[in-house]
Amino acid sequence: MTGMTRDHVARWGKAGALYDFVASVAFVTPWTGALAMDLLGTPHTTPTRMFATLFGTVVVMWSIVRWLRPERLLITADTIGRALFSSWFAWALWQGETPALAVFLALELFWAAAQWRALLRR
């Protein structure tokens, strides 16, 4: 991989990591997660807040790792994860979940496509 391609992958990988950090940091604690779910119009209970907190913590940690080490392997894994996660967003929308998920779906698809394009660039 050339230096230019490596830089391109790193740049898009770091940008995706920053987006993930900003989009997920509110879910790191049960209290801020509850506020975020209220803003999204998502009903929640203690168990859903705890799963949201788990999700928020893992995504924030993963985003920090990718920011610090935007390596091709990590960006590839993240891109595949985004594609899978997008399918679950689409499934939830199909099941009648809150339309607010459509915004997150569009953003996940954008970042998956941007990272995929950077990975394929030679």
Image (cartoon, helix red, strand yellow):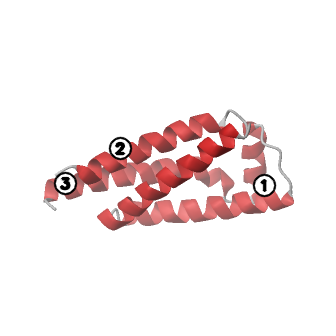
In this orientation, which residue lies closer to the viewer: 68 or 103?
103
Q: Position of residue 55 (x, y in %)?
A: 64, 60
Q: Nearer the viewer, mark 3 or mark 1?
A: 3
**What is the spatial separation of the Cα atoms under label 1 and label 2, in whole angstroms?**
33 Å
- Report which quarter residue 104 is drawn in: top right
**Residue placed under numbered mark 3 in the picture:** 5
In the image, residue 110 above or below residue 73:
above
Labels 3 and 2: the sequence-earlier one: 3
Q: Is residue 102 visible?
A: yes
Could you say whether the residue bearing mark 2 is in a helix, strand or loop?
Answer: helix
Q: Left or right of 116: which side holds 30?
A: right
Q: Residues within 10 Å of mark 3 (few under 14, many from 20)?
A: some
**Residue placed under numbered mark 2 in the picture:** 114
Furthest-left residue in view?
2
- The quadrant of the picture occupied by the N terminus is bottom left
Labels 3 and 1: the sequence-earlier one: 3
Amino acid tagged 1: Trp
Q: Position of residue 3 (x, y in %)?
A: 15, 59
In the image, residue 96 above or below residue 3:
above
Amino acid tagged 2: Ala
Amino acid tagged 3: Thr
Q: Position of residue 94 (x, y in %)?
A: 67, 38
Could you say whether the residue bearing mark 1 is in a helix, strand or loop?
Answer: helix
Q: Left or right of 63: which side holds 43?
A: right
Labels 1 and 2: the sequence-earlier one: 1
- In percent of the image, x 41 and y 55: which residue is there? 79
In this orientation, which residue lies closer to the viewer: 1 or 3?
1
